[in-house]
């Protein structure tokens, strides 16, 4: 492959990865801004989407119904999680929620391992395996789906939050929950909604990316973590998260291509850590440790 | 002096255990408890006391183990390798700590989480030096002069010596000036600074101290097992340490060690009985059980077992050296 | 301007300015505090009073101007260094260490009185132990001074507001300060508690401390202070003895104007 096609190819895989991280980052933000909970099961939602779809499909359901049920199931799991465990915490603090959701994530991961075994699974692409060629780089319809997902989610969520009554009420409660309660907004329903939304979005992401990246019980951790990293770097805003995600994805794509595929995580994560640290020196928005 | 009887009895029991119960199995498990307990203690000191949310502990543990192993294999005397490993870890922690500790709460947890992953991948990829993902074998035994430490019993005393030594160290620390300064960070760094405490310097110091302790623990592990692999030092260990701190109770100093004791014996029990029912018994699977235990503990017993014990024993007694929040 | 050669001036602030984003919290604030005096800083809400204390004690760095304490320029020094130079303070919102006992809170104030480091403390070296004993004596003295010696081992949560404020004072006193800055010390206190604080302040001045009080409570301020400084929207609009300030037209306008 000549250099141009290489660059293009890595860019494509980078943008694909970036789109995934972007949607996951938005899942983190939605829950965090609304409930102050750092939900470490976000990555597991993604995993559940892919694995449950595969499971239902393998059990005989068509691909599409299997996906729908998988998404619904993940939303339910997320909602149940919020209702039972997260709401029952007696001394809420960022630490407690963090540990709680890490534990929940481990439970989900282990359960999936028990049920489905440890091999990676594959789902067939939705639009078939036709491949487009652009200047020597390959582009599959699935990739377009992933990017499309990011666009839809970003635009849709922004519109929802800014232009619908429900969305505005949501933002209001995130900003000041006491005030929101005083005007009659049911804040606890909103928390449930946010968890459900994160679950659904995560699952959809998992399903759409499964044909490209395969799926297995352990993908949740790293993917979820990268989603968190871009959400933090993007300062929990939608445009910020998307921008950070695309940057991370491109870093990974080029890193994997030009440096070494095995070390792509190292490279990208290191850059992110540096960005986080540098941020404490300049931006007063990000809280400093001292 | 009443407060000294119970700890004294416990220490006596620990000391006498290998003599009374010479079962190698039990001694082996207790060795692990001492090692993980010491690690969990360090982690709790950082998290519950100083407000430093670093999850990088397994990294220091691993680097300590690896440097010790690699050096000893190449002929360096064991005691020197232990020292070299501790020095390496101290330098790394110092260099990385200064910028990292500026991050607050979960930002720091996030960054150190990334660090763990990077380290695990790094060790795995440096095959020629570290044996890669398959691990490093053939670590020579620990010999200090004419004394050779071999077998579970020797390492039982060594590991518990380290564990109890750490406990003693931190107990002294937390009841005096330097440790008190650390304890203020969770409540008000502004007030802390106004009282003359150099917050960033103290955070860095405790970070380095706990990392060196983790390194020493790693050295002991390397000499005991004579074999190490990257999987021992990664994310499952991090979650396990977190579990021990939560279940044991991070607010009281001996809590993490109690947590290590509980978790490890619970795991033995579960594996003995449930291994017959479930075919796949990897670290992730018992994560399900321990995840559930953590969840239940966080909801119903937020102070952990130690917190509950303290409540029973000390209702109304002086606050003294307690580290719990109200 | 160079440091004042007058040995009676403890603190001198000149052209002090602090911005937060576009807001001028402090602008061109300048005055001097004499040794052994009781001074007050008053002003409407948002005038910059707490910011002033924060800047002097080093929590925030000033954007412009100079702070000279005991003939030494301390502008730009970090908070913990300034604390060791002898400036102690209390906080409007107490900022006590909730998980520590009363005694331990006060002991933290003694931090600058000793230098045993982490290793010395952790290894329980004899001189570290001796230092610890000495610190406990200092803390007990401070607690006795404010009348809380019986509460030494209680957790902070058990104390009512008045006593918690006293713990803050004891903590600051343990620093052996030359200048004691009190941020809204009588806010929320009952009359007898405020009276007790007044007595404490007079005793402290008798021991040679200089007092600087930021307050809203007019009767308290006017009865106690030798000098009153008035801040409005970050600038000094008056300075002088209480009667003079009370009659000052600008001051009256600043306060009444707020209530309209």
Image (cartoon, grey):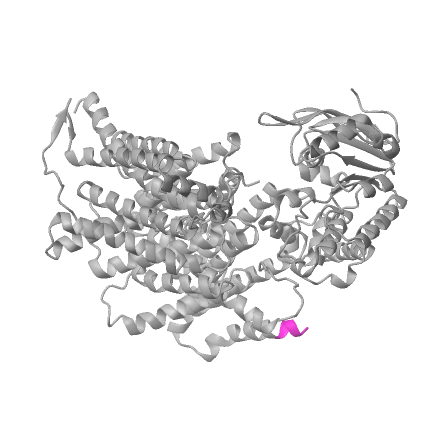
- Residue sitting at the far right: C206
- Residue sitting at the far bottom: B20
Measured from the top left, where is residue C205 in percent x and y?
87, 43
Quarter of the image for the C terminus of chain A: give it: top right
| Picture residue at 73% right of the left edge, 43% below the top | C184
Quarter of the image for the N terminus of chain A: give it: top left
Measured from the top left, where is residue C151 in percent x and y?
74, 62
Q: Is residue C12 above or below residue B46?
A: above
With B23 as the anchor, is C92 left or right in this view? right
Measured from the top left, where is residue A10 in percent x and y?
24, 29
Which residues lie in the magenta part? B1-5
| Picture residue at 26% right of the left edge, 47% below the top | A203
Q: Does residue A59 belong to the magenta stretch?
A: no
Magenta stretch, main secondary structure class: helix
| Picture residue at 24% right of the left edge, 44% below the top | A204
**In the image shown, does B231 or C35 lie closer to the viewer?**
C35
- Residue sitting at the far top: C1
| Picture residue at 20% right of the left edge, 53% below the top | A69
Measured from the top left, where is residue C55 in percent x and y?
69, 33
Residue B139 visible in the snapshot: no
**In the image shown, does B255 or B219 lie closer to the viewer?**
B255
Residue B273 visible in the snapshot: yes
**In the image shown, does B79 or B56 lie closer to the viewer?**
B56
Q: Quadrant of residue B320?
A: bottom right
With B124 as the anchor, is C55 left or right in this view? right
């Amino acid at each position: 492959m000549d250099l141009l096609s290489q660059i293009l190819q890595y860019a494509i895989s980078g943008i694909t990865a970036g789109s995934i991280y972007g949607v996951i980052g938005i899942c983190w933000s939605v829950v965090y801004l609304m409930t102050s909970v750092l939900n470490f099961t976000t990555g597991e939602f993604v995993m559940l989407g892919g694995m449950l779809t595969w499971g239902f499909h393998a059990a005989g359901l068509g691909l599409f119904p299997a996906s729908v049920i998988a998404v619904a199931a993940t939303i339910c799991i997320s909602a149940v999680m919020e209702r039972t465990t997260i709401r029952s915490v007696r001394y809420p603090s960022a630490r407690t929620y963090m540990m709680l959701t890490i534990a929940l994530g481990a439970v989900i991961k282990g359960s999936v391992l028990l049920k489905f075994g440890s091999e990676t699974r594959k789902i067939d692409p939705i639009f078939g395996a036709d491949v487009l060629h652009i200047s020597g780089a390959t582009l599959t319809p699935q990739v377009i789906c992933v990017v499309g997902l990011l666009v839809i989610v970003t635009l849709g969520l922004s519109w929802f939050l800014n232009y619908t009554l429900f969305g505005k009420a949501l933002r209001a409660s995130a900003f000041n929950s006491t005030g929101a309660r005083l005007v009659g907004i049911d804040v606890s329903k909103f928390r449930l909604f946010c968890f459900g939304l994160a679950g659904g979005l995560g699952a959809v992401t998992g399903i759409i990316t499964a044909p490209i990246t395969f799926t297995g019980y352990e993908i949740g951790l790293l993917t979820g973590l990268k989603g968190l990293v871009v959400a933090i770097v993007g300062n929990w805003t939608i445009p910020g998260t998307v921008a950070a995600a695309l940057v991370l994805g491109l870093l990974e794509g080029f890193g994997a291509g030009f440096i070494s595929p095995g070390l792509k995580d190292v490279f990208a994560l290191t850059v992110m850590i540096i960005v986080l640290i540098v941020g404490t020196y300049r931006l007063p928005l990000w809280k400093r440790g001292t | 002096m009443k407060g000294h009887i119970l700890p004294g009895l416990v220490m006596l029991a620990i000391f006498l255990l290998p003599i009374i119960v010479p079962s190698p199995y039990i001694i082996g498990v207790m060795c692990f408890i001492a090692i993980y307990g010491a690690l969990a203690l360090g982690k709790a000191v950082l998290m519950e006391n100083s407000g430093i949310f670093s999850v990088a502990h397994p990294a220091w543990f691993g680097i300590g183990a690896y440097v010790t192993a690699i050096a000893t294999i190449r002929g360096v005397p064991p005691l020197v390798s232990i020292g070299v490993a501790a020095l390496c870890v101290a330098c790394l922690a110092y260099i990385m700590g200064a910028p990292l500790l500026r991050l607050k709460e979960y930002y720091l947890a996030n960054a150190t989480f990334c660090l763990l992953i990077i380290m695990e991948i790094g060790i795995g990829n440096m095959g020629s030096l570290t044996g890669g993902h398959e691990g490093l074998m053939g670590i020579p035994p620990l010999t200090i002069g004419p004394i050779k430490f071999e077998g579970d019993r020797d390492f039982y005393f060594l590991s518990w010596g380290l564990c109890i030594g750490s406990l003693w160290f931190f107990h002294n620390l937390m009841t005096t000036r330097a440790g008190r300064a650390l304890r203020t960070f969770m409540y008000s760094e502004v007030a802390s600074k106004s009282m003359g405490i150099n917050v960033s310097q103290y955070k860095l110091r405790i970070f380095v101290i706990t990392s060196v302790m983790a390194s020493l623990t790693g050295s002991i592990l390397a000499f005991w097992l004579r074999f190490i692999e990257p999987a021992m030092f990664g994310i499952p260990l991090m979650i396990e340490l977190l579990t021990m701190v939560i279940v044991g109770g991070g607010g009281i100093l001996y809590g993490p060690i109690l947590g290590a004791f509980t978790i490890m014996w619970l795991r033995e029990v579960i594996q003995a009985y449930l291994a017959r029912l479930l075919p796949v018994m990897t670290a992730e699977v018992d994560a399900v059980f321990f995840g559930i235990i953590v969840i239940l503990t966080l909801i119903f017993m937020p102070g952990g077992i130690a917190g509950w014990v303290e409540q029973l024993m000390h209702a109304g007694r002086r606050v003294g050296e307690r580290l719990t929040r109200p | 301007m160079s440091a004042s050669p007058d040995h009676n001036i403890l603190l001198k602030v000149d052209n002090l300015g602090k911005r937060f984003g576009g807001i001028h919290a402090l602008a061109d604030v300048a005055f001097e505090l004499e040794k052994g005096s009781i001074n007050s800083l008053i002003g409407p809400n948002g005038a910059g009073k707490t910011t002033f204390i924060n800047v002097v004690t080093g929590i925030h760095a000033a954007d412009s101007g100079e702070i000279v304490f005991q003939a030494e320029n301390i502008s730009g020094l970090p908070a913990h260094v300034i604390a060791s130079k002898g400036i102690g303070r209390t906080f409007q919102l107490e900022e006590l260490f909730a998980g520590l006992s009363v005694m331990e809170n006060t002991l933290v104030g003694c931090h600058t009185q000793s230098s045993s480091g982490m290793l010395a403390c952790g290894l329980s070296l004899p001189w570290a132990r001796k230092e610890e004993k000495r610190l406990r004596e200092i803390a007990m003295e401070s607690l006795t001074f404010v009348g809380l010696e019986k509460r030494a081992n209680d957790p902070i949560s058990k104390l009512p507001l008045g006593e918690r404020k006293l713990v803050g004072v004891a903590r600051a006193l343990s620093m052996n300060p030359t200048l004691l800055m009190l941020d809204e010390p009588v806010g929320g206190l009952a009359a007898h508690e405020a009276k007790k604080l007044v007595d404490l302040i007079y005793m402290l001045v008798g021991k040679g401390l200089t007092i600087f009080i930021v307050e809203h409570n007019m009767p308290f301020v006017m009865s106690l202070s030798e000098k009153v400084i008035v801040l409005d929207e970050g600038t000094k609009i008056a300075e002088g003895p209480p009667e003079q300030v009370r009659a000052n037209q600008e001051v009256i306008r600043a306060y009444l104007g707020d209530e309209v």
